Amino acid sequence: MITTILTGALELCAPVFLFLSAWRMTRENGPGLRGAAARIAAAFGLYWAIFLPRLIYLRATGQSDIGRMTILREALTLGHSVVPFAGLFGCYAAGVLLLLALSRVRGLGKWGSVFLYMVAPVTAAVVLRFYAPELPMVQRAMENLIPHIAMMGAGGAVRRLRGQMDARLARHPERTQRALTWSALLACIAGTPLGTVEVGALQLVGNRVSFPVPVGALCASLAVLAALRLVRPGETAPAEREAAPAGRPFFSRETTDALKGVAVVMMFAHHFFTFPEWFICEGSYPASQDFAELMRLPLAMCVPVFAFLTGFFYARRPREKRTMAYSLGKIGELLAGHALALLVLLALSRLCGVRTGAGDALLELVGLRSEVSLFNWYICFYILAMLMLPVLLRVPGLGPAGMFVLTILLPVLLATAVRALTPGGSLPSVAAQAVLDGVCPLGAGVMAARFASFGRMRKRMTARRALGCLLLCAGALLARRFAPRLILSLPGLGESWQLRVSMDMLYAPACVFALGNLLDAAPRALLRPLAAMGRQSLSMWLLSAAFFGASAPLCQRLLYAPVYPVFVLLWGLELCYVGACALSAVRAAIAKIAARALQIDENRV
């Protein structure tokens, strides 16, 4: 399954590249003769740099007997015996010439641009292929050219329609951006599995000629175009929303909530599909083992994102407000919300025959035991972090190196020592492991807020910010897959004294910065559901333990009832969101009753 997905994704790279290349080349006056010649020369230069060493190697090893005519065809990218993807370079050169010729045509409307850039070149290639059955080289060239020339024509047509898009965008900015984003996303989801669709539409000499339409590649290209906001960079209203005025947090409240919503989606996918050993229901697990091994670490970025945001927003507070009283208040709010979720989990586990005593329930509440509330280790980490931050941030005059030692290295050393000196599974060892799991991104958040790292990164990333953010986020997730932590062995000490420094101190800031900037420019139709989930993120996280903890025999079958992974994910998000909203309503009602009771007591006094 995973091999098929990766192969399909890689096959889309070349068509998407051709689409975006054509989009960039199609200016008001076209690429120009000199620019077209330079692009063709660069394409053939790159191809010959691949072709010649490959040819010399094949001739030297005797693996292939290639004649002079074959070498000539291969040099002109009309064959693929030496370089399998040679046709891509030839199609790129042909597409550049096509764009150069079509850019001279003026006064085209919407349908005229589509016909001239897409329908006419593809029709000409199909007809030429049909009328040249005795020329196999021409047939092969046309078969290779048709889908690629369609992609370049589509890119040129979209660019020619830019004026009409701009006019509509100026009249209805949010509505147009929302429609563009959602239509491209839905088209990509529906069209990518289709690949190339054969459309029969032309009768030639009694035979019906089919037109291969690369639906999947076109949909993927439109999705990439919408994601990069290339319709009119720098001028659309959603892209220009400033999220961080002076003196306020870097991201707006809505963007921060949406960022938490993205982390919740990643967390649910991580729990639902990357732990096959948690699956206890009858039937097949709705995800492959290859997917679980490949995506387990990248999807686990969700927890470092939450830890980073905790440190970031705590350090953003004024110095006089970073007090122990504030930290105790936040701990009280967290425990109150967890207590309600824990009551639900205890009731469900009781129905499954699991009894939990008062002492064990108290340990579950503070995150030192995880039989019923499976994901409550973050509660323990959050309590320790809130108690630690007011003390650490009182030290003045520290630079980046000093802050790194104080907020990351020192807690890692202390937690490593506690874990090494206490028996495994004991309460101090559990607490030390919770600190090791979350303190590195927490410290990175404190440093990012203290030294205004995001502001400096945004100033440096002035051009192509969307593309840069996409690459930054993808690079962080990929790096976490192969290098999740740095292990340092202390000389003379055993394995239990190894320092395990999480590389999330680098990956979490990169993901938060990239996703925050992308969400700042996203349409509100996408932000609202993510922000709604973000506001209920903690309760959703805790309630999702019902599917895998002691209550799994009762609840897991309900979660995996839709079978298909996408539907399972959406169904799980909906169930936990409804449950979290219900808990919020109960909590608000309890707070209201308590406030009235206190008011009555004050009046009596």
Image (cartoon, rainbow, N blue to C red):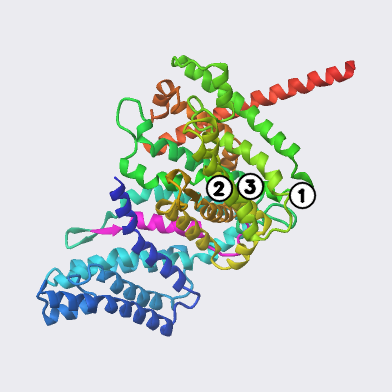
Q: Which mark is residue 335?
A: none
The crowd level at tag 2 (other Cα within 10 Å; few <14, some 14-19, many 20+) is some
Q: Which mark sits nearer the N-terminus, 1 or 2?
A: 1
Question: Crowdedness of circle 3 by 10 Å Cα count: few (<14), some, many (20+)?
Answer: many
Image coordinates for residue 192, horizontal then vertical, percent: 35, 51
Which residue in the protein does label 2 denote? 413
Q: Amino acid at mark 3?
A: Gly
* Discs 1, 2 touching: Cβ within 8 Å: no
Give x and y (percent) for residue 72: 18, 81
Q: How far across and down, in percent of the image, does residue 447 sit?
A: 63, 55
In the orientation shown, which residue stands out farthest toward the bottom?
Answer: 34
Q: Which residue is mark 3?
A: 311
Out of 179 and 226, give the one closest to the viewer. 226
For residue 319, the mark is: 1
151 with respect to 576 (left or right): left
Asked if residue 415 lies left or right of residue 47, the reply is right
Disc 1 packing (10 Å; few <14; some 14–19; many ≥20): few
Q: Is residue 332 magenta?
A: no
Q: Amino acid at mark 1?
A: Arg
Label 2: which secondary element: helix
- Indicate the amino acid at tag 2: Leu
Q: Residue at x 41, y 34 (%)?
A: 568
**Start and end of the magenta stretch?**
210-237
Looking at the image, tell me whether mark 1 or mark 3 is earlier in sequence order: 3
